[in-house]
Image (tube, rainbow, N blue to C red):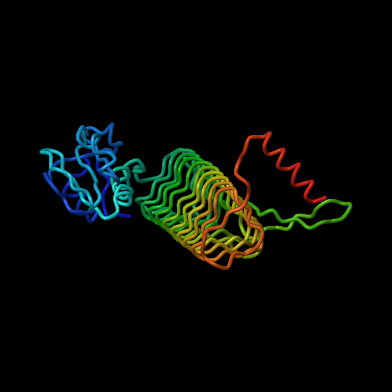
């Protein structure tokens, strides 16, 4: 995260160049407060280009206030439109977006009169608790943290400094969330894991889930994602992990630092996922497996056994016309006979 403050007045080109570690070419006092695509950017906007040759005409006609460009670019300086030269333009854009977009999550400090905070809870003086939020006994909310409207935070929860909860986030008892995390609306952290013992003809007996969920710092969790508490020990999400919407992380799962997980992934209980992994949308990971560091799992892959080496892994058949697919299946059946 770059060191920048969220201000309505935006940033000068010089300030952004210093923050992003880039080289400024042109006027340094030009100020921008927004982000926009190359073709739509106006004088108050920052934009970026990764392939100057491909977008030469758009660059020439662009009205943006500041443009981020790669170090390989050889562009003329146009008066009033400074350039910031970066080794990695897309990374620079990401960091600039954090500066220019941070004010979206600014909230006034204090507890709204319409919130309920148990007397046994501790809320930092500069934290924000919005209307309709419920904070349970023994919970600690760190400096600058934000609990938005109608969030439910159970007993004995820890929320680290600078963490932001969007409306209707649910953190159940004993959950621990690190610093500078972002949790999007509807996510539920700490629900019971799916644990039942067969009672034969009498159905199923519930196994009480007595563990916790522990989430590191700088984690982002998407809307309507669920992370179950452990049965006896904790479900653990490492530092810097990014989880998309509609992901299910079952009980006792461990996810290593800086792993990214796309939408609709399902991870069954007690799976161990390494650090710096990337898991594509709709993938399924069976329980009690181990996945090494630096593994990429392609979208819709079903992981049925452990992966002990870094690399790219995929399964499944790409979509085809239904008639052709049915003919292929018929031939496979004949081969089996």
The residue at the point 70 percent across, 42 percent down is 328
Q: Is residue 300 left or right of residue 205?
A: left
Q: How many marks?
A: 0
Q: Nearer the viewer, residue 215 or 154?
A: 215
Q: Nearer the viewer, residue 304 or 314?
A: 314
Q: Nearer the viewer, residue 39 or 128?
A: 39
Give the vertical position of 152 relative to 258 (above or below). above
**Percent coordinates x, y for residue 50 in the rendering:** 30, 46
**Percent coordinates x, y for residue 4 in the rendering:** 26, 51
Q: Nearer the viewer, residue 179 or 305?
A: 305
Q: Is residue 268 left or right of residue 279?
A: right
Q: Is residue 110 left or right of residue 208?
A: left
Q: Is residue 56 left or right of residue 305?
A: left
The residue at the point 16 percent across, 50 percent down is 24
In the rendered image, the residue lying farthest to the bottom is 308
In which image quadrant can residue 329 be found? top right
The residue at the point 50 percent across, 55 percent down is 278
**Percent coordinates x, y for residue 57 in the rendering:** 23, 34
**Percent coordinates x, y for residue 337 in the rendering:** 83, 50
If the image is split into quadrants, where does the N terminus sit?
Answer: bottom left
In the rendered image, the residue lying farthest to the right is 201
């Amino acid at each position: 995260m770059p060191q920048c403050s969220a201000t309505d007045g935006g940033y000068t080109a010089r300030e952004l160049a210093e923050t992003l570690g880039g080289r400024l070419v042109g006027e340094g006092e030009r100020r921008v407060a927004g982000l926009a695509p190359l073709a739509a950017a106006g004088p108050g906007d920052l934009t970026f280009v990764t392939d100057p040759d491909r977008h030469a005409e758009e660059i020439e006609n662009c009205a943006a206030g500041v443009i981020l460009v790669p170090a390989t670019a050889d562009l003329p300086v146009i008066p009033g439109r400074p350039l910031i030269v970066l080794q990695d333009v897309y990374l620079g854009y990401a960091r600039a977006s954090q500066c220019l977009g941070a004010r979206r999550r600014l909230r006034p400090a204090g507890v709204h009169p319409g919130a309920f905070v148990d007397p046994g809870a501790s809320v930092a003086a500069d934290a924000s608790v919005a209307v309709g939020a419920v904070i349970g006994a023994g919970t600690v909310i760190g400096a600058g943290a934000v609990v938005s409207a109608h969030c439910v935070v159970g007993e004995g929860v820890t929320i680290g400094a600078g963490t932001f909860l969007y409306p209707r986030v649910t953190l159940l008892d004993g959950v621990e969330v690190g610093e500078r995390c972002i949790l999007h609306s509807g996510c539920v952290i700490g629900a019971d894991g799916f644990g039942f013992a067969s009672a034969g003809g009498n159905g199923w007996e519930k196994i009480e889930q007595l563990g916790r969920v522990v989430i590191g710092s700088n984690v982002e969790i998407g809307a309507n994602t669920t992370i179950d508490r452990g049965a006896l020990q904790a479900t653990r999400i490492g530092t810097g992990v990014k989880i998309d919407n509609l992901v299910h992380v079952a009980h006792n799962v461990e996810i290593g630092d800086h792993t990214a997980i796309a939408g609709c992934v399902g991870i069954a209980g007690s799976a161990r996922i390494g650090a710096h992994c990337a898991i594509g949308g709709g993938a399924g990971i069976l329980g009690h497996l181990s996945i090494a560091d630096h593994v990429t799992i392609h979208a819709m892959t079903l992981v049925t056994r452990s992966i002990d080496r870094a690399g790219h892994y995929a399964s499944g058949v790409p979509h085809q016309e239904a008639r052709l697919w049915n003919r292929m299946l018929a031939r496979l059946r004949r081969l089996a006979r």
